Amino acid sequence: MTGRHHDAEGGRDEDAVHDYVEQMAMTFARFGFPRMAARVLFALTTSDDASMTAGELAERLEVSPAAVSGSVRYLMQLNMLVREPVRGSRRDRYRLPDHAWYEVTASNGQIYEEIAKLALTGVDALGGPGTPAGSRVVEMADFLRFLQGEMVAILERWRLTRLGAPEDASPGPDPAGSV
Amino acid sequence: MTGRHHDAEGGRDEDAVHDYVEQMAMTFARFGFPRMAARVLFALTTSDDASMTAGELAERLEVSPAAVSGSVRYLMQLNMLVREPVRGSRRDRYRLPDHAWYEVTASNGQIYEEIAKLALTGVDALGGPGTPAGSRVVEMADFLRFLQGEMVAILERWRLTRLGAPEDASPGPDPAGSV
DNA sequence: CATTAGTTTCACAAAACTGTGAATACTGAC
DNA sequence: GTCAGTATTCACAGTTTTGTGAAACTAATG
């Protein structure tokens, strides 16, 4: 025993996991993601069954139940988390869906379209699509719609190549030696 | 004269443009983009030559020069704005590059790889890629790298089809009647 | 070299955001 | 129906972010 909860080769190092969760969460926070929600997300990501109760999350992260409550609500609204009532108990388990990153990326794709639509509402005020400013806005909207369309296609490709193949327990055909 | 600065059919309606800038900026702010930077961005987007001095921006947006200064620095760091010193004057013009959205999307692509790399640093602590948590992290990293790679490809396709074709003043081949 | 227009920096006030503890409201068990 | 265990809501405090006014800095012009 080293003082760090490191079981053995291949075992989990809980302290290191703790650090890792915090590091990932802070990185996401830098990109505008709510801090506590990021902590919850990675606490779940790093738990072996991708599932914890609110109480377990609070204990693990050493934060109040209130903070967990707010964060899980936020994450659920983003479709990154599902709540699963536990039969025979009033506890709910919060679980990361199986392919959460794929799912959330797919469901967020719609925001490109929303922004494009909003952008185009300004074209008239700018004097129409023939004016420099008007055409600039149209180009932006076109670009966003292009991105959205392509995104749908590449997500479909991911779904087919990675999620379509049923048995793929190994990390993947492309371990991509850490760059 | 209606009280709104609307010249004629096809002319700009400055009041409406003002509202539009604010609306777009607030939408971006909801997604975590700094508010004032968003205002500056859309003030430039909606100006006919995509270029203004700091003073013009401050006047147009009715904010302090200090706020403009901070925001343009932020936007330049994101490659969404270039500073162009004006010869024979101490004024700098801040200009939106021609295909700003394309450019910034392309230059931001790298963040997927960064997050993927950071994510993989946790695999050991989780007990290796064979554990449930470890494989989950590997899948996330794989997905992010896949996205990044595909993004590079689709941006290249945009560049070739839209920026490669020299004359395309019309809004585009696909007006995409508002969905 | 002094003047002046324009921009940036700095310290500070206001607003927004985060997370907490306490109170409240659910929900299943008995 | 009552009890007990959980989850949620609410008001608040600490922190961070945002934007301002004033002063400092920079560069062209007479």
Image (cartoon, coloured by chain):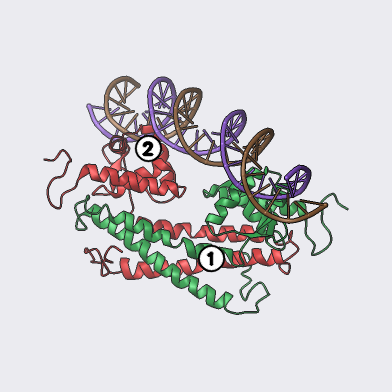
Chain colours: A red, B green, C purple, D brown
Q: For this rendering, which residue is in front, A100 or C27?
A: A100
Q: Is residue B30 above or below residue D4?
A: below
- Asked if the residue at tag 1 contacts the one at tag 2, i.e. Cβ–Cβ closer than 8 Å, the answer is no
Furthest-right residue in view? Answer: B1
Q: Chain of mark 2?
A: A
- Which image quarter is the C terminus of chain B in? bottom right
**How much space separates mark 2 and mark 1, taking CA atoms?**
38 Å
Q: For this rendering, which residue is in front, B11 or A1?
A: A1
Q: Position of residue D24 (x, y in %)?
A: 62, 39
Say which residue appears at 51% left-offset and 59% top-offset: A110
Q: Is residue A108 something that shows in the picture? A: yes
Q: Amino acid at mark 1?
A: Glu
The label shown at residue A68 is: 2
Label 2 vs label 1, nearer the camera: 1
Say which residue appears at 33% left-offset and 53% top-offset: A97
Q: Chain of mark 1?
A: B
The label shown at residue B103 is: 1
Q: Position of residue B27 (x, y in %)?
A: 59, 50
Say which residue appears at 36% left-offset and 64% top-offset: B145
Q: Position of residue B96 (x, y in %)?
A: 62, 61
Q: For this rendering, which residue is in front, B61 or A79?
A: B61
Quick one: label 1, few (<14), some, or many (20+) residues within 10 Å?
some
Q: Amino acid at mark 2?
A: Val
Q: What is the tally of numbered marks visible in this picture?
A: 2
Q: Is residue B57 above or below residue D5?
A: below
Say which residue appears at 48% left-offset and 60% top-offset: A109
Quarter of the image holding residue B177?
Answer: bottom right
